Structure formats: C-alpha cells, structure tokens
C-alpha cells in the first residue's frame, strides 16, 4: 500500500534551518507530483511547495526564497529545505502524493512532522 513517512522536524530558533524528508513507497514515485503542506494550530492546512515528476517546482509566496523542495527518485524521497525560519512557520508539515489509481487520481498523506520555531 502507499506509505509516506515524514521526518526531520524539530525545535529550532528563529533564523535557523531544518531539512524535512518524505520517504515514499507503494507507488511509482518518479511519476508522481509530491507536495508539502503545513497546518498550524487553529488554522487550515496550506500548500507550501510542490515538485512535479519533471522537477518543476512552485512555492507559496510566504516561503519563496527561504524554502527549497527537491526530490531523489533513486531514494523515493522528497526533501524540503527550510531556511531563515520564522515563528510563523511553526506547524505540522505533511507530504502528499498524487497517485493514479485506475482512471482517477488519489491523494495520499503522511502522518506529519512537527516544526516549532522559537523567537
């Protein structure tokens, strides 16, 4: 079955950096777009960054220039390098894969990794 496992979160001071990882299994990873989302307490989940199967990327305006998404198809892993962290980046970060199942696209989510930025 499809599995997405995030890691790399933690507690960091403002201005610090982390590298989040999302390891995938159960589908043809190289053919799928992968996204990172985040959800802060009391807020809706929001899209942070996406990387397509052709390595095209896009970012939320709030993280442009600070976050970088990348993928390693040999390791079935997507990374999110988060730099210059701000307290408002505090959230649970989730990865999502969009996978063809028959004739429809299905979204799969990981369990999330907590990022906490102290001021």
Image (spheres, rainbow, N blue to C red):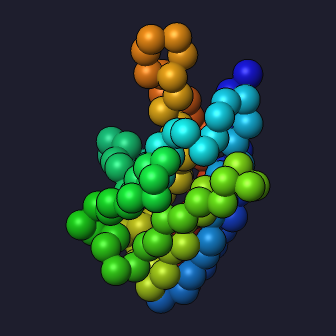
The residue lying toward the viewer, choosing from 116 and 104, is 104
Residue 106, x across and y down, in percent: 48, 22
Q: Residue at x 60, y 45 (%)?
A: 30
Residue 63, x across and y down, in percent: 34, 70
The residue lying toward the viewer, choosing from 98 and 85, is 98
Which quarter of the figure is the C terminus placed in? bottom left
Q: Which residue is drawn at 33% across and 60% down?
A: 58
Rendered image quadrant of residue 75: bottom right
In this rendering, is residue 22 above or below 58? Answer: above
Residue 48, x across and y down, in percent: 38, 57
Residue 112 visible in the snapshot = yes
From this viewpoint, which residue is outermost toward the front? 54
In this rendering, is residue 115 above or below 87? Answer: above
In this rendering, is residue 2 above or below 43? Answer: above
Q: For the image shown, how many numbered marks are present on the structure?
A: 0
Which quarter of the figure is the N terminus placed in? top right
Q: Residue at x 52, y 53 (%)?
A: 93
Residue 11, x across and y down, in percent: 63, 72
The residue lying toward the viewer, choosing from 16 and 102, is 102
From this viewpoint, which residue is outermost toward the top? 102
In this rendering, is residue 88 above or below 6? Answer: below
From this viewpoint, which residue is outermost toward the bottom? 15
Residue 40 visible in the snapshot = no
Q: Which residue is drawn at 52% across and 28% down?
A: 99
């Amino acid at each position: 079955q499809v599995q997405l496992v995030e890691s790399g979160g933690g507690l960091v001071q403002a201005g610090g950096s982390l590298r989040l990882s999302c390891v995938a299994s159960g589908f043809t990873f190289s053919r799928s777009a992968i996204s990172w989302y985040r959800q802060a307490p009391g807020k809706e989940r929001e899209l942070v960054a996406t990387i397509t199967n052709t390595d095209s990327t896009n970012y939320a305006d709030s993280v442009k220039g600070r976050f970088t998404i990348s993928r390693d198809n040999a390791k079935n892993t997507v990374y999110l390098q988060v730099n210059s962290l701000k307290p408002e980046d505090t959230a649970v970060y989730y990865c999502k894969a969009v996978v063809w199942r028959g004739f429809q696209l299905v979204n799969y989510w990981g369990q999330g990794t907590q990022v906490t930025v102290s001021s």
